[in-house]
Image (spheres, helix red, strand yellow):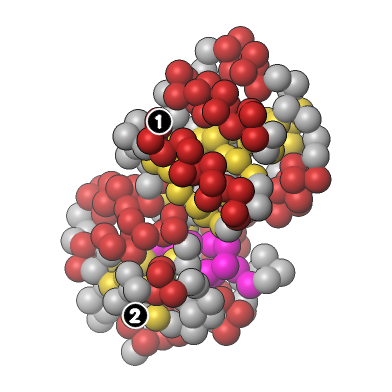
Amino acid sequence: MSRYKLLALDLDDTLLDARLKVPERSRAAIEAARQAGVRVTLATGRMFRSAVPFARELGVDDYLITYQGALVRHAVTGETLFHRPVPLEEALEVIALVKPFGYHINIYLDDNLYVAEHTRESEQYGAMSRIPVEAVGDLTAFLEKRRREPTKVLVVAQEAQLDELAQAVRPVLGDRLHITKSKPHFLEFSHPLANKGDALASIAGRYGVGREEIIAVGDSYNDVEMIDYAGLGVVVGNARPEIKERADYVCCSNEECGVAEVVEKFILG
């Protein structure tokens, strides 16, 4: 019987291949882990509605970590374990700080995606996430009218531009928001406790699972907290060197079914 009771998997560039598909070997390994009594959660920066189809495909019937850990909701029942949105004032401040740079901004509200106008970035993001994108004009006016706290704010630009932006906004917002890159061209702003590590701890607590009984697999900066939290923190071979340094184990790449390798070695082995 496996000493591990909970398996947390990032989606993009970790479980999914370059075609945004779950490789058959990894799908079979996850099914075998579930049959062995291991709970599986998907831990992603994606929206809940964008993650659910993968959960259904994999037969995952536990809580999902979505929006980087801002929303933890059950894949089947839809029950929300917690929702930690960006405070409205901070969301408006992010928009104001980003506006002079002219970069594309995504706003997430009620598991819907809103943008100021349709752009190449919004089209690409919608295609990747397989969800509709709604253009609403000025985002500040949109949020002020709704008076609602968005789940997440995401900025899309080139990596060098985002690094410059992060350097500019961290002194202003760094103690009030969690700021991280999920992909080289995605800079994410969320609630200060909205990260995959805190979300994973909440799920583990719900199920009575200890840290030492958890495997977490990821590839990027937004995975660091859950990799650090898990008893076995795994990073895929396609990750950057600075992320691999955080790992207890480095498996092969997403294209080489790294998730399957981890399950076969540490759960089924």
Residue in the image at 75% along x and 21% along y: 137
Query: Disc count in the image?
Result: 2
Residue 256, how many percent across, how many down? Answer: 57, 84
Q: Residues within 10 Å of mark 1 (few under 14, many from 20)?
A: few
Q: Which residue is mark 1?
A: 172
Residue 24, how many percent across, how many down? Answer: 61, 79
Residue segment shown in magenta: 7-17
User: Is 204 on the left-hand or right-hand side of 145?
Assistant: left
User: Is 203 on the left-hand or right-hand side of 32?
Assistant: left
Note whether 130 is above or below 28 in the view shown: above
For the residues labelled 2 and 1, say whether their Cβ atoms are less than 8 Å apart.
no
| Amino acid type at image mark 1 | Val
Note whether 216 is above or below 236 in the view shown: above
| Amino acid type at image mark 2 | Tyr
Is residue 224 covered in magenta?
A: no
Q: Which residue is mark 2?
A: 249
User: Is 214 on the left-hand or right-hand side of 177?
Assistant: left
Is residue 11 covered in magenta?
A: yes
Q: Look at the image and tell me in which quarter the N terminus lies.
A: bottom left
Residue in the image at 40% along x and 32% along y: 173
Quadrant in the rendering for residue 191: top left
Asked whether 46 or 169 is in front, the reply is 169
Task: Indicate which label's residue lies in the foreground, 2 or 1.
Answer: 1
